[in-house]
Amino acid sequence: MIEPDFLRTTRTAYDSVAVQYAELFANGLEDQPLDRAMLAAFADLVRAGGGGPVADIGCGPGHVTALLHSLGLDAFGIDLSAEMVALAREAHSGIRFDQGSMTALGLEDGSLGGVLARYSIIHTPPERLPEVLAEFHRVLAPGGHLLLAFQAHDRPSELAESFDHKVALAYRWSPDRVADLLPENGLAEVARLLCAPREDDERGFPQAHLLARRV
Ligand SMILES: C[S@@+](CC[C@H](N)C(=O)[O-])C[C@H]1O[C@@H](n2cnc3c(N)ncnc32)[C@H](O)[C@@H]1O
């Protein structure tokens, strides 16, 4: 199958910055209590639903996969970038990391208790987001949970708008419009958290966390 251009360019871009990216996030999510709170709630819900493997899709250097592990989940990471996967394996030797794409996951139907996609759907062209949500639905077991995090915008008439991400072409999303796409892909919204822009974010983008359950 011919690989779409956006996957090739995103992979090449992240391959070339993987080391700097890993250094930037060496402290994990220490200074991000709201992110940690959403991840802790996600972990509780996955465990309450019977557990099962959890895929951190677009895991980068694996720091959040490791956090999920520390929360008692059977977490593993998947990333488009071979360099990211290599760094994640090196830093977290007890955890599994595979190269792959959220557009076509090499995973069995209904095999996961949870899917995390943290700032990784941002590189998906808007017209392909439904396909990605359908893929997350396919790999989740009934009752499994999905947690998305992404840069948000507040114009609900637009699903997405592109922005000048430092690494690769990226989109920020309307939380309402992304939530609208959940039911038609077999997912029900459970909760959402909209965080005001961080003081150190000169672009002033709000951050959205959207939690859903596979129906
Ligand atoms: C902004 S980084 C986020 C990394 C990590 N999730 C975090 O929270 O720091 C985006 C990551 O998603 C990966 N990615 C982008 N598109 C992807 C795709 N289609 N499938 C899998 N990974 C993807 C990139 O290679 C990169 O490592």
Image (tube, helix red, strand yellow):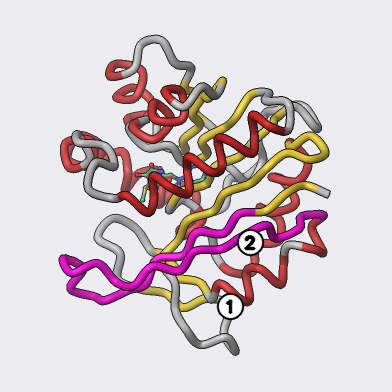
Ligand 1 quadrant?
top left
Query: In the picture, which quadrant includes the N terminus?
Result: top right
Question: Which stretch appears magenta?
Answer: 186-211
Q: Give, as a three-letter code, the residue at label 1.
A: Leu
Q: Is residue 36 above or below residue 194?
A: above
Mark 2 vs 1: CB contact within 8 A: yes
First along the sequence among labels 2 and 1: 2
Q: Which image quarter: residue 128? A: bottom right
Q: What count of labels does the image hold?
A: 2
**Helix, strand or loop at disc 1?**
loop
Q: Is residue 101 above or below residue 70?
A: below
Residue 190, image x and y in percent? Answer: 68, 57
Residue 60, image x and y in percent? Answer: 37, 37
**Helix, strand or loop at disc 2?**
helix
Residue at image mark 2: 129
Disc number for residue 10? none
**Left or right position of 200 against 87:** left
How many C-alpha atoms fall within 10 Å of the one at disc 2: few (<14), some, or many (≥20)? some
Is 54 magenta? The answer is no
Q: Residue at x 24, y 60 (%)?
A: 166
Residue at image mark 1: 159
**Left or right position of 143 against 203:** right
